[in-house]
Amino acid sequence: MSQQILLEKQICEAFIKFQRELVGRGPETAKAMICRDMVIVRSKGVLTKEEKHVSNTRKGRALVKQLRMELRESYLEQIEKMVADLTKCQVVSSHGDISIRTGEQIEVFILNTDLEKKLKTN
């Protein structure tokens, strides 16, 4: 197994564990991808039963999205540190969003180095 695939698997597992501890359940599926100087984590099935129920209205979707974005802000330093520790790179910035309609979440971490290239040369 290549270093990149192994690291992507470790990042994915760490995210699932973190989500389980934070929300009480993890995503149905998750995939981590390293692309140049970015780590992208795409999770599906992240909404709780309660969030799905509230999301049946426009106002409910807006509330759930607002709550999830506030939640992300509260744990931002933790997930950036987690990615930095796993990749051994500095996280320059990170961006995240969630689709309440599809229950899909995406996190993008911008690193201070081209990790994909670094892993291929090692």
Image: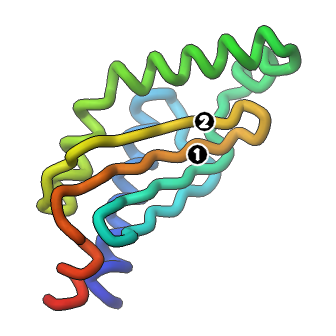
Which residue corresponds to mark 2? 98
**1 versus 72 height, above or below:** below
Residue flagged by tag 1: what amino acid is it? Pro
- Image location (x, y in percent) of residue 113: 17, 65
Q: Which residue is at 78% across, 34% downward?
A: 101
Q: Which residue is at 54% across, 57% downward?
A: 30
Q: Earlier in the sequence, mark 1 or mark 2?
A: 1
Q: How is the image coloured?
A: rainbow
Distance in Å between CA atoms under marks 1 and 2? 12 Å
Which residue corresponds to mark 1? 27
Instruction: State the quadrant of the N terminus.
Output: bottom left
Q: Is residue 121 left or right of residue 26?
A: left
Q: Nearer the viewer, residue 112 or 101?
A: 112
Residue furthest to the right: 56
**74 versus 33 height, above or below:** above
**Residue 13 figure quarter:** bottom left
- Image location (x, y in percent) of residue 68: 54, 23
**Residue 99 figure quarter:** top right
**Residue 63 figure quarter:** top right
Q: Which residue is at 23% across, 71% downward?
A: 115
Q: Is residue 62 left or right of residue 15?
A: right
Instruction: State the quadrant of the C terminus.
Output: bottom left
Check disc 1: other Cα within 10 Å, few if <14, some if 14-19, many if 20+: many
SS of the residue under disc 2: strand
- Image location (x, y in percent) of residue 98: 60, 35
Q: Is residue 112 left or right of residue 76?
A: left
Q: Nearer the viewer, residue 28 or 87?
A: 87
Q: Which residue is at 70% across, 15% downward?
A: 62
Residue flagged by tag 2: what amino acid is it? Ile
